Amino acid sequence: MRFEIDERIHGRGEVLAAPDSGEVERLARHLAELGVEAVAVSLLNSYLDDRHETMIARLLRDRLPGIYVTAGSELTREWYEYERCCTVAANAVVGPRMAAYVSRLEDRLGEAGFDRTLFMMGSNGGVLSVERTLREPITLIESGPVGGCIGAGAFSEALELPDLIAFDMGGTTAKYAVIRDGRYALHSPYYVGGYATGFPIRGSVVDIVEVGAGGGSIAWIDGAGRLRVGPRSAGSDPGPVAFGRGGGWIETPVHRRSALAAGYAADGPLIVEEYGATTVVGPGERCAIGELGEIRITVGG
């Protein structure tokens, strides 16, 4: 869903039209009625002057308690509007889930007697405070594989090998990064899903490249009889086939995305195919098509 606000800052930084608080409050009420979980605020020239974006985000946070609100100028002040908009939109997508995850993690750590400071691995190879993680969760993108590569860098230093290739295979993908003279390259923008078909994220990410599927990637046959691998993973349970915990072939229907109308719902396992994307709904999950045509997957039926 996209909504417009009547405002404009000129490309030279002059204010041409300031946003009206009444219009923002009406929008907030409408968003509450729609039951949104997150809101991304992105204005054309906010990299020059963020006052309008800041005002809109502040009002929305005041009027929408419990709803995740993020603004593009809080994440990047570079002038590329498309990349900036993609970045804040992605931040809004992962924000609510990250907030819930971090809350559970802190509770579990507290129950276990952890009384130190919690940090998160950042995509640039550094660490982030919990506060910054919740404000900028998109800065954790690829942080798992990046963490593995940073570990390889520590070995590089200890073994006095300034040039090497760091390889990290997880459950879903396998990635590598190159260390030259003991240093990693940082990349911005980073294209999630690859340069050709992915979308850009503005922010420093270790230059890491996907080279294959992961150890737990699930092999399956699509509607045309072709063997496919991933993107779904077996996770830690039952885990990769090498764990010997069962698994094997599963009979599952394959649906064309264009044939599924709003209101459709079915339990997994099933596969939904469309141009450029494949959605795999695993056993114990439920797939539903929302009013706007979006695919919603819930765990536990």
Image (cartoon, rainbow, N blue to C red):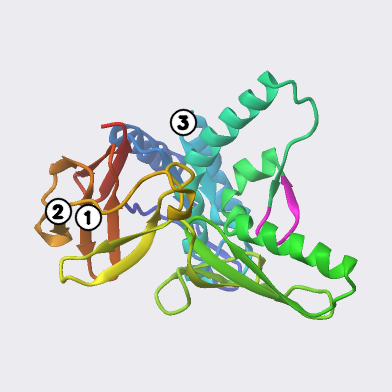
Q: How many tags in the picture? A: 3
Mark positioned earlier in the residue sequence (3 or 1): 3
Q: Does the magenta stretch include residue 258?
A: no
Residue 104 at x, y percent in the picture: 56, 28
Dot 2 surroundings within 10 Å: few (below 14), some, or many (20 or more)? few
Write the start and end of the magenta stretch as one range: 122-128
- Location of residue 262 in the rendering, given as x and y in whole percent from the top left corner: 14, 47
Indicate left or right for 294 with 128 as reference.
left
State the SS at label 1. strand
Q: Is residue 195 left or right of residue 27?
A: right
Lower sequence index among marks 2 and 3 = 3
Q: Which of marks 2 and 3 is in front?
A: 2
Residue hosting label 1: 271
Query: Label 1 crowding class (10 Å Cα cut-off): few <14, some 14-19, many 20+?
Result: many
Mark 2 — residue? 253
> Residue at the location (85% across, 78% down)?
162
Residue 35 x/y as whole percent: 32, 34
Cα–Cα gap, marks 1 and 2: 6 Å
Three-letter amino acid code at the position of disc 1? Ile
- Mark 3 or 1, closer to the camera: 1
Circles 2 and 3 in contact, beta carbons < 8 Å: no
Q: Which amino acid does label 2 sit on?
A: Pro
Residue 229 visible in the picture? yes
Callouts 1 and 2 close, C-beta under 8 Å: yes
